[in-house]
Image (spheres, rainbow, N blue to C red):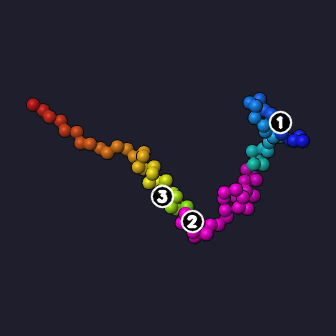
C-alpha cells in the first residue's frame, strides 16, 4: 500500500528516498515561501500585522519580566 514508506532503525516511519539538500532548498525557496503554503504568507493584511506585532511585544515583555537580570543592590562596606 505504502511502497515509499519504510520503518527505520529507530522504529519510526520515513520515506525510502528523501529529497536531497538541494531539492529541499529549491522547493522552499521557490515554492513553499512564494505560494503562501504552511504558516507563511506572501503578504499580510494590516490587521494581521497588528496581531503579529502585539504577539511579539507580549513575548518580549514576558521574556524580560521572567528572565531579566536581578536588580543591582549597592554594597555598603563598613570599616572600623
Mark nearer the N terminus (3 vs 2): 2
Q: Which residue is mark 1?
A: 6
Q: Where does the N terminus fall, quadrant-wise? A: top right
- Is residue 34 visible in the rendered image? The answer is no
Q: Is residue 3 left or right of residue 39?
A: right
Q: Is residue 47 left or right of residue 65?
A: right
- Is residue 23 visible in the rendered image? The answer is yes
Q: Residues within 10 Å of mark 3 (few under 14, many from 20)?
A: few
Residue 30, position as x, y percentages in the image = 74, 58
Q: Residues within 10 Å of mark 1 (few under 14, many from 20)?
A: some
Secondary element at image label 1: strand
| Residue at x 75% of width, y 53% of height | 26
* Residue in the foreground of this view, choosing between 1 and 20: 1
* Residue in the foreground of this view, choosing between 59 and 79: 59
Query: Residue 49 has which mark?
Result: 2
Query: Would you say residue 40 sits in the magenta stretch?
Result: yes
Query: Would you say residue 17 sits in the magenta stretch?
Result: no
- Magenta residues (range): 25-51
Residue occupying the far front of the picture: 1
| Residue at x 42% of width, y 45% of height | 67
Residue 60, position as x, y percentages in the image = 47, 54
Secondary element at image label 3: helix
Amino acid at each position: 500500500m505504502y511502497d515509499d514508506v519504510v520503518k527505520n532503525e529507530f522504529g519510526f516511519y520515513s520515506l525510502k528516498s528523501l529529497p536531497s539538500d538541494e531539492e529541499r532548498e529549491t522547493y522552499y525557496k521557490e515554492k513553499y515561501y512564494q505560494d503562501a503554503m504552511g504558516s507563511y504568507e506572501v503578504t499580510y493584511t494590516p490587521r494581521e500585522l497588528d496581531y503579529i506585532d502585539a504577539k511579539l511585544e507580549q513575548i518580549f515583555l514576558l521574556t524580560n519580566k521572567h528572565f531579566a537580570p536581578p536588580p543591582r543592590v549597592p554594597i555598603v562596606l563598613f570599616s572600623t
